[in-house]
Image: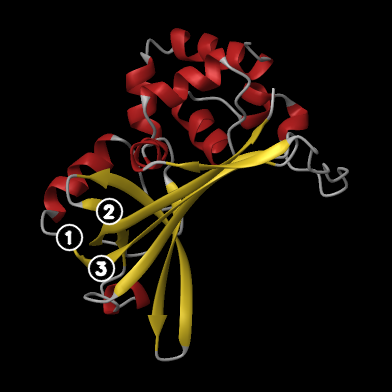
Amino acid sequence: MTTDLGRRLAARRTAAGMSREELGERCGADAHYIASLEDRAVLPTAGVLVRLAEVLGTTVDALAGPRAAHDPGRPVTRPRTDAQPVVLDEEECRRLLGVRGIGRVAVFTADGPAVHPVNYLISEDGIAFRTGADSVLARAAGTEAAFEAEQIDEVAARGWSVLAVGVIEAAPHPAALGRRADSAHATPWAGGERTHWMTIAPHRLTGRRVEYRP
């Protein structure tokens, strides 16, 4: 079922002369995710909308409609009684990680646990992201860390989350990661001097999705 957002997105992409693969690469997603946005009733998060609008040279309102912005006064959607959590296998967890570009890294510090949002890429070495050379995440090298990515649709009361656990390390191929990030226009949202690439190679990968019984 195509939504208004899907039709607008497909029209803007076609007008820009981009394939789904090209748009996905530039937004840090993949062609399957772009296809889901265009052809199915899948709603992206606000962050994804911002990146799509930027790459397509338009605005969030023009792409998704003026009511797409978060309204603090919007009634909270109550969970449906036919909802059920579904455990995801590793293959599905890896696929879902590939359609997102924003996640959170949790590490232990001398002051206790710390959680930091990051822009990330999936590489052959694991989950890769940039940080400052003297940041909390850089100083955590060699320790166990957790990484979580998710997609939540508050209106439909559905979504998924994936949790990866592994050792955080300095990336072995930072130059290659930098080139990939540049080609995908994947700039850290936080700005600043973030040139130190880190990776987490998951040794445990789990996930859940909220689905509805037919």
As drawn, 209 above or below 42: below
Q: Quadrant of residue 77?
A: top right
What residue does disc 3 label? 167
- The residue shown at (36%, 48%) is 187
- Quarter holding the N terminus? top right
Q: Are marks 1 and 2 in contact (CB under 8 Å)?
A: yes
- The amino acid sitting under disc 1 is Ala
Q: How many angstroms separate mark 3 from mark 2 (CA)?
A: 12 Å
Residue 88 in the figure: left or right of residue 181 = right
Q: How many angstroms separate mark 1 from mark 2 (CA)?
A: 7 Å
- The amino acid sitting under disc 3 is Val
What residue does disc 2 label? 128
- The residue shown at (35%, 50%) is 120
Q: Nearer the viewer, mark 1 or mark 3?
A: 3
- The residue shown at (75%, 36%) is 155
As drawn, 81 above or below 141: above
Residue 169 in the figure: left or right of residue 65 = left
